[in-house]
Image (tube, rainbow, N blue to C red):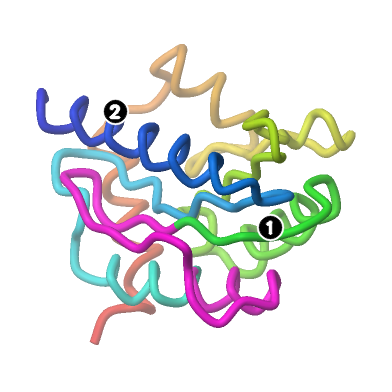
């Protein structure tokens, strides 16, 4: 558990470090994988897909940061026009069922995260039902085993 907390802190430090370079906006690319195994079979290919999509949407050839930690891989990609960038990232997150596991967080130049709510967009839905994901997580509506099973099912198309 400490390694997961350390990874979160290191990711935040990396984000703040990149923001010092003064980008107009950036995207923090990661996967949202339930359970202890944060890098199950198929996750590497899913992350690679998400990174390619993000780089193309940001007209970038490579990420500013690309790293791997206890939570899996992550990347930071420079972009512009944070609200429009967030809309493009939501499109990627909605491109196919497995993209529901992709987390594309957009930040403006001052480090403020641009959320779906600020753009009048609906929150992400739960992996298992039509309710907002954050509500299901907070209420612990679904057994973690079911969430993990759905995660593995979504990753199945990305397995070699």
Q: Which of 121 and 85 is in front in this view?
A: 85
Q: Is label 2 or label 1 in front?
A: 2
Q: Earlier in the sequence, mark 2 or mark 1?
A: 2
* Badge 2 element: helix
Confirm whether the magenta stretch covers residue 59.
Answer: yes
Q: Name the residue under label 1.
A: 89
Say if 19 sits above or below 141 in the image.
below
Q: Nearer the viewer, residue 4 or 82?
A: 82
* Badge 1 element: helix
Q: In this view, does 29 lie to the left or right of 80?
A: left
Label 2 to label 1: alpha-carbon separation: 24 Å
Q: Name the residue under label 2.
A: 9
Quarter of the rendering containing residue 119: top right
Confirm whether the magenta stretch covers residue 1.
Answer: no
Tell which residue pokes out farthest to the front in this image.
Answer: 21
Tell which residue pokes out farthest to the bottom in this image.
Answer: 160
Q: Which of 108 and 139 is in front in this view?
A: 108
Q: Indicate the position of residue 123 as horizontal and vertical percent values.
A: 70, 34
Q: Label 2 crowding class (10 Å Cα cut-off): few <14, some 14-19, many 20+?
A: few
């Amino acid at each position: 558990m400490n390694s997961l907390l350390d990874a979160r802190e290191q990711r935040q430090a990396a984000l703040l470090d990149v923001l010092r370079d003064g980008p107009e906006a950036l995207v923090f690319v990661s996967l949202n994988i339930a359970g202890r195994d944060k890098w199950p079979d198929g996750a590497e290919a899913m992350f690679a897909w998400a990174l390619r999509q993000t780089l193309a949407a940001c007209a970038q050839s490579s990420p500013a940061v690309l790293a791997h930690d206890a939570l899996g891989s992550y990347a930071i990609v420079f972009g512009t026009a944070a609200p429009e960038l967030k809309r493009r990232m939501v499109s990627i997150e909605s491109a196919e069922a497995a993209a529901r596991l992709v987390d594309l967080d957009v930040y403006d130049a001052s480090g403020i995260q641009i959320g779906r709510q600020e753009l009048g967009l609906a929150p992400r839905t739960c992996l298992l039902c039509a309710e907002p994901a954050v509500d299901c997580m907070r209420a612990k509506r679904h057994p973690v085993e079911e969430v993990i099973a759905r995660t593995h099912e979504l990753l199945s198309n990305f397995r070699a």
